[in-house]
Image: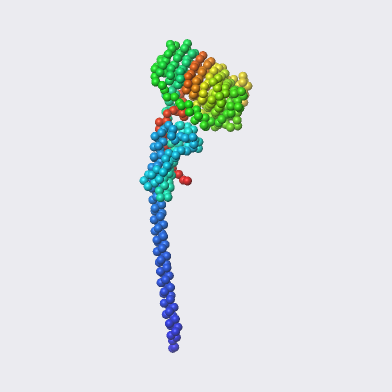
Amino acid sequence: MKVNVNNMGRGRQHHRGSVYLLVIATGVALTSLGIAGLMLVRAQRAATARSDGAQRARIASQSALEVGVSVVAADLSGASWRTGSPSSVLFSAMTIGDATCSATVSNPSGGNLSDSNAGPFRVTATANVAGARQSVAAEFVPSATAYPVMQRAIWSAGTMNLMGTLYADASVGSNTSVVASGATVYPAVAGPSVTGSTYKSTTTIIAAQTMPDPSVIDMWAANATPIAYASLSNGTMQDIVLSGGNNPYSSSVNSAGLYVIDCGGQKITIQNCRINATLIILNPKSDSQITKSVLMEPYYRNYPVLLVKGVMTIAMDSTDLSESAEQTNFNPSTAPYRGVSDSDQTDTYPSQIYGLTYVSGDLTIQTNSTFEGLVLVGGAVTAQNTTTIRSHPPDVPIAGFSQVNGFKLRSSTFARQVD
């Protein structure tokens, strides 16, 4: 048999080439695996670093939240953080461990922080660690105690001049002096100075009591729906119903029953009407008055009924407010009276002011005015004729008329924030 030596040589060369290619391929594969392994290790290290940074940032954000809460707690009055905007910075660029932290406080309802000194607030804290960012937030509700004067029937910062008959189911008094001149005063009286001899109960000398700041009126006005003074006929509110569901002066109603009128120094007269709202009167002329038959009640029981920034005279009749006499339906479907509405004009309503009345200036009470609630006066008060006050202290503290003494966490609101 004849053997082709040349073909045998080519076979061995082909075999050696195949082995060489296999070695190279194996090397490439191993190198690729090595590179992939290194990349995986680096990715794992980066992921671990990010996870570690996020964890440190999460812990730091919780610490920042505690710091933010402590800043708020150091100023319960809110003077430094209840600003005229929806949010306020508590601190920024604070170092906690290896994190850079900040915290803000905001109004959960979206209004301004200054809208209420006793409203809820949210504290949000953020921490950054090596590019990892974490945020947490929680809401808090202030706890408050009503000013002691909220247990009185009527109290004034200035002199209290009693010149008629005063009936009240709680004590009355002044931060300055109480003077009874030809008066018959049935309730207990207190103040730094009490003069006169017609008191039917006890008189007590006490120090001045804490009174609300006049700025509380601005706080309530900030949430109120404006009623243009020009929309009042000759500056008079008469034969109307104003409530949280009914505004005779505009298509805009305030669901909380808050309305404000800026008189701009002009006289306003309120008579023969039903007001189921919190009425805020700004800058009234000195001869402004609430007169004749008027029923005033707040839309919400924990709201004031009447806030006056300035002076006012209240000279109401004891005669009931009559629909037939005024040819007005005072309990339409948009403003039920104690849950009852109709379309006739046969009903009558008591002429009285129910709830908290606060006048920042002087107050004069004339004729036979009746209050089913307490009266606070920032200036002097003069009570003539017959005044009847059944105090009805509020069941819960009213914003601006109470002292904030702490706050509590709304536990269900603590959560991580997502940008």
Question: Where is residue 330 shown, x and y percent of the image?
Answer: 59, 24
- Which residue lies at the image location 53% right of the left edge and 29% below the top edge? 258
Residue 46, x across and y down, in percent: 40, 55
- Can you tell which quarter of the image residue 317 is in? top right
Q: Is residue 244 above or below residue 23?
A: above
Q: Exactly how many numbered labels are in the figure?
A: 0
Residue at the image point whose x is 43% and y is 83% from the top = 8
Asked whether 83 or 404 is in front, the reply is 83
304 lies above or below 161: below
Which one is nearer the viewer's eye here, 106 or 200? Answer: 106
Q: Is residue 111 shown left or right of residue 76?
A: right
Quadrant in the picture for the N terminus: bottom left
Residue 301 percent location from the top left of the image:
50, 27
Q: Is residue 310 left or right of residue 130?
A: right
Q: According to the image, what is the colour scheme of the structure?
A: rainbow
Residue 193: quarter of image: top left
Q: Residue at x 43, y 70 (%)?
A: 25
